[in-house]
Every structure is written in structure tokens, then in C-alpha cells.
Amino acid sequence: MTGSDETPSFRLAYVPGVMPDKWVRIWNERQPGVPLILTQVPAGAAAERLRGGEADAGLVRMPVDRTVFSAISLYTEQTVVVVPKDHLVTAVDEVAPEDLADDIVLHPLDDVLDWRSLPGRPALERPATTADAVELVAAGIGVLVVPLSLARLHHRKDLTHRPLKDAPESSVALAWPEDAKTDQVEDFIGIVRGRTANSTRGRQQPPAQDKPQRDDRRKPQPARSPGANRRGSSGGTSKGGKRGKPRRRS
């Protein structure tokens, strides 16, 4: 946001598991005069932050309301199952949903996966958060299915994870209110899309300087007087002229 008497800044919200470090570093290199203010928000609260004007843009999980927000999909995460290190599924490289048929599969209230049918057996109660569910997995209560970034975020030495095939996936996007696209948002779009600082689509591109055009026309030569370059034109002997006979001495 830019005010007439305020230092311009760019406010970016991001959800747990998303690591904006690389983009933040590039922003600070290219925009040293525009502070980037980062705020981590729960996945379910990101849209409300953007809608309420508390952030200029957000790194959020899809889907988003396309009637309110514009969004650029950035990447899709692998889905994994988090289990104790001594769980049977650790013997395989990839887990199928049927491999979890006898397990309690925890379903936290802040789950970001769009399940049609959760594998395994349901728990008696849903944990409030993913962090709470991880604690229950460590206690041997059940297992947890999450995007890979959340498994890494809540890593514990006594837990591990394996890819889960045929499971819903979570996509991360850059989103902003459709009617509030600022210059700073445009600059950040260029960064996440990998544009260089000198990209012709970047807002920071300086106006092209007009190169002086080369004039290939020959400059007019000064006029020459008739015979100026001929031998003898200034009193010398012309080519082919006869020399006078030398006079004999008497």
C-alpha cells in the first residue's frame, strides 16, 4: 500500500508450509526501498485477510473464490502419510489407500486436502489443528495425511512419511483481490514467474534510449576546380607533353 506521506510497502500473507524465502530475497534485492511485510496466517483465514485489505497478496492453497480473487497457480504438492518410524508402511516406498485400512486416519479441522472419502478408519473426534494431529500420531493414536510441506514443517525425529498415491493434492497459488492489483503485486508476480529485473514485462524496466541512427549517406565532397588534380595543372608538364631541347653551350 502506498500513501502520500507513508513509506510504500508490500504486505504478503502466506499459509503454513509455504516457504517464500527465495522470493523475499529477490524482492529485497530489487526493491530495497519497499519493505516486504510477511504474515503467516492459517490456511482457512488467508482469503479473509485479503478480502479485508490486511494484505496486498497471499501465497495460499487452492481453490480460491475466482469471483473475488485473481490467482496464479505456482506448484502442486505431493501428498504423504505421516506415521511412526516403526509403522508397517515404512517398509515400502509408496503407500496405497488400502494399506491404511486398519489405521485410524486423523482428519484435523484445518485439513487442506479435498477428500471425497478419507482412507482408513475415522477417529472419534477431529483434532483442531494439523499440529495437534501430529502429536496424536507420535502418541500412536493414528496416522495423518498431509501435503509434503506440512509433513516437513511438523517434522519430528520419531515420525516419518511416505508418498500416498491416489490421494487428493494441494496446489499453492499467488492470489490477490481482483479489484486491488497494485504496482507492488505486479512486481511480485514477475518475481514468482521468474522474470528478470530487466524483463520487458517488468514494471521496473527503464524506458528504452533511442540509439543514434547511423547516417550512411555520403557527405558531399568539396567542389574541385577543373584540372586541380592533374599533373601540370599548376604550370607543370602534362602527361605526354614534349620537353624543350636543351640549349648547347657555345
Image (spheres, helix red, strand yellow):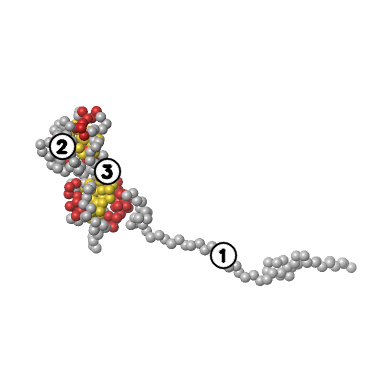
Q: Secondary structure at mark 2?
A: strand
Q: Which residue is mark 1?
A: 218
Q: Is residue 38 visible?
A: no
| Sequence-wise first label, 1 or 3 | 3
The spot of residue 178 in percent (x, y) is 24, 56
Is residue 73 among what the camera can see? yes
Residue type (three-letter) at the residue carrying disc 2: Leu
Q: Give residue 76's mark.
A: 3
Q: Earlier in the sequence, mark 2 or mark 3?
A: 3
Q: Using the image, determine if residue 110 lies above or below residue 223.
A: above
Residue 132 pos. (x, y %)? 14, 39
- Amino acid type, residue under disc 1 in the picture: Arg
Quadrant where the image shows the C terminus: bottom right
Residue 109, image quadrant: top left
- Give the Cα distance between marks 2 and 3: 22 Å
* Residue to which mark 2 is pinned: 106
Mark 2 surroundings: few (<14), some (14-19) or many (≥20) residues within 10 A: many
